[in-house]
Amino acid sequence: MRRKLVLGNWKMHGSKAQVRQLLAGLAARIGEVSSAVDVGVCPTHLHIPLVADLLAGSRIGLGAQDAYADPSGAVTGAVSVSMLVEFGVSWVLVGHSERRQLFGETDQQVATKFAAVLEQGLVPVLCVGETLQQRQEGDTETVVLAQLQAVINKAGIEALGNSVLAYEPVWAIGTGETASPAEAQIVHQALRAHMAAMNAQVAADTRIIYGGSVKGANAQQLFEQADIDGGLIGGASLEAEEFISICKNAD
């Protein structure tokens, strides 16, 4: 039985005061969330030390939004996976659509980051998803399976057993639009079937979470789908009450 997972992706949001207020709100309500649900937050790199301190002793885990593949070097502005390890990070997002679109990350670069995260003993959260144009042209499965296969080619199918997949349709991120539960399930099922063709056990064990304007109002219907194992939450994760509501619906 796969445990549900809900991760909050704070993106480029937050001041120190806002972080303290948000985490205080989460700490006050996290007891309402079933212990069968794993919960984590992914702050900016600047806020990771503060969040790590504030989460000490909490069941809320710590994630990072990105990492550079090389362990060190003359790479201005980059943060390596080994640096994240020192601050107690558990999950690292790789290949988020905003990294692919705004920073031009390729499937091959994402695969290299994925392997680097695994090598340091952290859990990569591999993000895949299609644009609106790709969806309209009927290319959703072709796109997301190619993004997945690039990682399999680099790290091997067994590596996915130590990772999380996140299906985030680009057209639904921050737009208020979301795939219907049935539409999301179709893609999640396709991702799992693709893995199962190579390793049935890995496919059965790997958590595939959904992101794309998930809210407390639609979380239950999404999380009830057979192959949706939780959510990667954007804007709604910046509001304690809304985020807790989503987490409660994952039980």
Image: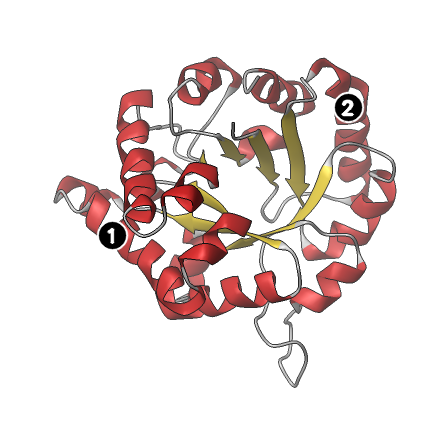
Q: Earlier in the sequence, mark 2 or mark 1?
A: 2
Mark 2 is surrounded, within 10 Å at the Cα level, by few (under 14), some (14 to 19) or many (20 or more) other residues, namely some
Measure how far apart labels 2 and 1 are at the Cα level: 38 Å
* Residue 206 rendering spot, x and y as whole percentages: 47, 41
Q: Does residue 163 show up?
A: no
**Quadrant location of residue 17?**
top right
The quarter of the image holding the C terminus is: top right
Query: In the image shown, does 118 or 204 lie closer to the viewer?
Result: 204
At 43% from the left edge and 46% from the top edge, which residue is drawn? 202
* Residue 86 rendering spot, x and y as whole percentages: 80, 61
Q: How is the image coloured?
A: secondary structure
At 50% from the left edge and 22% from the top edge, which residue is drawn? 215
What label does residue 25 carry, if any? 2
Query: In the image shown, does 22 or 222 lie closer to the viewer?
Result: 222
Provide the residue designation for mark 1: 143
Horizontally, is 127 left or right of 27 in the view?
left
Query: In the image shown, does 54 or 201 lie closer to the viewer?
Result: 201
At 35% from the left edge and 54% from the top edge, which residue is drawn? 148
**Quadrant location of residue 213?**
top left
How many numbered callouts? 2
Residue that lies at the very extreme toward the left in this rendered image: 137
Determine whether 60 is above or below 108 in the image: above
What label does residue 171 carry, if any? none
Determine whether 64 is above or below 182 in the image: below
Q: Secondary structure at mark 2?
A: helix
Q: Amino acid at mark 1?
A: Val
Q: Amino acid at mark 2?
A: Gly
